[in-house]
Image (spheres, helix red, strand yellow):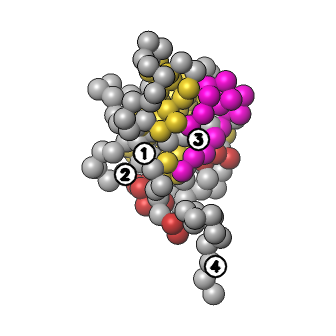
Amino acid sequence: MRRLFSEGISMSSEEEEASHRPSSVSSLSDSPCSSPPNLHYVGKKEEIVKAGRLTKLLNGCRDVLILYHDRQLYAMDKRCYHSGGELQHGDIEEFNGRLCIVCPWHSYKITLAEGEGLYQAVDDPTKKPPRTHWRSKGVKQRIHKVTEINGDVFVTLNKSCEAIESDFYQTEKYRPVTLKGQPVPKKQ
């Protein structure tokens, strides 16, 4: 395991591209200055690169984390699918050749490109020493598409109808402030 750390950026995302890698960055430098429909402006690329990580509330309902790591932009739901940990505080690490963000609460590993949950499996627990390998739990974290247009960065929200576990934490209950900027009342 090689440990890597990078500051990340959180942004919103737009429609899914025909590509099977929704976190891929496409460059539309020949496009007009106005943003295409369904694209959410999240900032200038140079500012995102400098910050490394950014979170944005997009479309009034989706908390998104944008990360810049190894010259690549990624966007995903801000809170971990497992227990709602804020992923912007997680380290970036490589597991079995795949870049992951590690949840700071319970160390769940989530691939940046696909949103898969990874875990270390044991072949035969009766054998000593145990032999382990990395396995996928499947897609657990919603990934969004990032597009760069003339230095501006946009996110297209992944609007797949298929439920993904990170969707659970996309409610007012898990936001520190309401949409109107007022603190969420604490339950007594």
Q: Decide which of tag 1 and tag 3 comes sooner along the chain.
A: 3
**SS of the residue at dot 2?**
loop
- Asked if disc 4 and disc 1 are in contact, CB closer than 8 Å, the reply is no
Under tag 1, what secondary structure?
A: loop
Which badge, 4 or 3, comes first in the chain's sequence?
3
Horizontal side of 55 relative to 82 (left or right) equals right
Q: Residue at x 42, y 17 (%)?
A: 31
Residue, disc 4: 186
Q: Which residue is mark 3?
A: 10
Distance of label 2 from label 4 (alpha carbons) = 28 Å
Q: Which residue is mark 2?
A: 164
Magenta-drawn segment:
42-57
Q: Which mark sits nearer the N-terminus, 2 or 1? A: 1
Camera sees residue 23: no
Depth check: give the residue in front, 20 or 99: 20
Considering the numbered disc 4 on the image, is that residue within a helix, a strand or a loop? loop
Label 2 close to label 1 by CB (< 8 Å): yes
Amino acid, disc 3: Ser
Circle count: 4
Give the number of the disc on residue 142: 1
Does 86 sit left or right of 133 as displayed? right
- Residue at image coords 58%, 65%: 180
Question: Which x, y percent locates residue 23?
Answer: 45, 31
Q: Position of residue 39 (x, y in %)?
A: 43, 35
Q: Is residue 43 within the magenta segment?
A: yes
